Image (cartoon, rainbow, N blue to C red):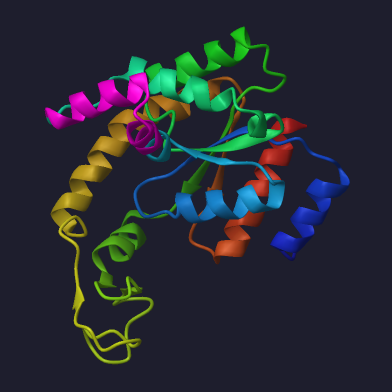
Amino acid sequence: MKAPSLEEDTVSAVSRKLIPGPILLLGAPGVGKGTQAQELAKVWKIPQISTGDILRGNVARGTEVGKLAKEIMGRGELVPDDLVNRMVAARLAEPDTSEGYILDGFPRTLGQAEWLDKHLAEENSPLPVVAVSIRVGYTQLLRRITGRRTCLACQHIYNVYTQPPKSAMVCDVDGTPLVQRADDTERVFEERMRTYESQTTPVIEHYHSLGRFAEVDGEQAVDRVAAGILAAAERLRS
């Protein structure tokens, strides 16, 4: 049976007037959550909400919570959940979230997931969070991360395994030597994976127990992964 294309799934979603509501994208480092969040935000015409963006925005605007977060980060500490939750609550109250939003990077712990469910219930949100996890095998993830090389001049990114430059370690665009970022090593990747699994496994179990969880194969082309997420969201909302 032929797998549905992104175009077919998009037409299906529009024709059925699916209101996506809050969609949580989960996945290990390197699965492409950011890329998929951007793609789905365009399809559904809803915002992509990233805690990193929210945090930077509050710090830049000098809000009360932004000043607190800046002070905490200045001490080299992690911003606590209660402060992150306050920032997220303010963002979810903005009018562009009325039809839904793509959550990218939040909730990343069970405590955040439980807070979000409670917050949406208290705000009489018409739809609860549904979670879709993008699944990619460990070896493939390792190649995606450790194979990355970046041109510091034009910021073009290559991968020595899947998208190598024409000449080894030299940018095709401007001839600048390519570099490997310090956090794109196997040692750093393994640490990030351990952190991800310890934090996110309880989140997956939480949404799975509520019947609001699905998984898609992330080792496909970008458009086919997006189509799989769209189809999963439709099933979870039906």
Residue 66, horizontal then vertical, whole percent:
33, 26
Residue 37, percent across and down? 54, 48
Question: Which residue is found at the position 53% from the left and 64% from the top?
Answer: 220
Q: Is residue 103 left or right of residue 65?
A: right
Q: Is residue 66 magenta?
A: yes
User: Which image quarter: residue 86?
Assistant: top left
Residue 123 or residue 198, whichever sits in front:
123
Compared to 11, does 56 lie above or below? above
Q: Is residue 4 visible?
A: no
- In magenta segment, residue 5: no
Q: Secondary structure of the magenta portion, mostly?
A: helix
Instruction: Say left or right for 103 vs 80.
Output: right
- In the displayed orientation, state which residue is furthest to the right: 15
Image position of 96 with respect to 127: above or below = below
- What residue do we see at 31% from left, 60% from top? 139
- Residue at image coords 55%, 52%: 38
Decide if residue 123 is on the left or right side of residue 56. right
Report x, y in % for residue 235: 72, 38
Which quadrant of the figure has residue 150? Answer: bottom left
Q: Quadrant of the N terminus?
A: bottom right
Q: Does the rendering let one see residue 13?
A: yes
Tell me where residue 39 appears, x and y as whole percent: 59, 55
199 lies above or below 221: above
* Residue situated in front as seen by the camera: 96 or 61: 61
Question: Which of the image's four quarters has the C terminus?
Answer: top right
The magenta stretch is 55-75
- Circle count: 0
Q: Residue furthest bottom?
A: 167
Q: 44 above or below 163?
A: above
Q: Residue furthest front?
A: 62
